[in-house]
Image: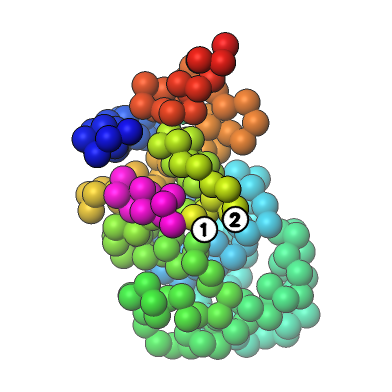
Amino acid sequence: MNYMGVSSRKARVRRALLRWGRSNFRPFWWRQVKDPYTLAVVEVLLRQTRATPIQALAKDFLSKYPTPRSLAIGPQSQLEADLLPFGLNVQRAEQLRALGESLGDQSFPKKLEAILRLPGVGPYAASAISCFIFGRAVPVIDVNIARIVQRVFGVEIIKGEPRKNKEVAQLAQQLLDGKQPRRINWALLDLGALVCTQRRPKCSQCPLLRSCSYAELLECAA
Ligand code: SF4
């Protein structure tokens, strides 16, 4: 692809994602929250499992632990028991407690670098908080988003995980173009979960079909 080709492809992909998202966003309750602590806890709870089945459980968990302080006090054994339904282990309970202790009564940090320093908050959760709560144009790259970017732009990855690949990260950043980052990231997350799945992607239902290198290859191979 030449420069103009890549550039116009990005613009087309962005428009298609925004259009698709309008009628296909998944209605997770945590997408409406404004509180970074709540989203930080949700991201920890989501780590071992799929989002849809744990929506009600996550709400119950947060009504029991509504503030960082509530995570920091109280018996560790109770916290561990409350994490069992999420398939989370003792180590995750320790991380959540450390998060509660670290935040205490202070306000939640706003800068990505500072969020990344919080215990138990990895790069994905930090980017999600930065984008979805503070509205920053930060790509939220999980395996699904990495897969879509890799397939659409035909990124060749010889070694290492796609979600840690520099070219994938750059393209995901450029797709945001500083505008509507929440909606673009949600659309990518939802497209990866619903349409561009690891096995048998549903290309015929995909809004990116006309821009996708992988779909072109499939068509040539058919
Ligand atoms: S056209 Fe197919 S491979 Fe390309 S993004 Fe859509 S579902 Fe994924």
- The N terminus - image quarter: top left
- Residue at the spot x=50%, y=62% of the render? 124
Q: Secondary structure at mark 1?
A: helix
Q: Is residue 183 left or right of residue 144?
A: left
Residue farthest to the top, as pictured:
222
Indicate the colouring scheme: rainbow
Q: Is residue 93 left or right of residue 102?
A: right
Q: Are marks 2 and 1 in contact (CB under 8 Å)?
A: yes
Secondary structure that dominates the magenta span = helix
For residue 27, say whether it is visible.
no
**Is the residue 70 above or below the residue 48 in the image?**
below
Instruction: Check disc 1 and give the amino acid type.
Output: Lys
Query: Which of the 4 quarters of the picture holds residue 42?
Result: bottom right
Q: Is residue 170 magenta?
A: yes
Instruction: Check disc 2 and give the amino acid type.
Output: Gly
Whether the residue under disc 2 has CB within 8 Å of ligand 1: no
Badge nearest the viewer, 2 or 1:
2
What residue is disc 2 on? 160
Report the span colored magenta.
Answer: 166-175
What residue is disc 1 on? 164
- The C terminus - image quarter: top right
- Percent from the top left, x then y, of residue 156? 50, 42
Q: Residues within 10 Å of mark 2 (few under 14, many from 20)?
A: few
The answer to which of 13 and 89 lies nearer the viewer is 13
The answer to which of 83 and 5 lies nearer the viewer is 5
The answer to which of 161 and 54 lies nearer the viewer is 161
For residue 12, say whether it is visible.
yes
**Is the residue 157 above or below the residue 133 in the image?**
above
Q: Is residue 92 left or right of residue 197?
A: right
CA distance for labels 2 and 1: 7 Å
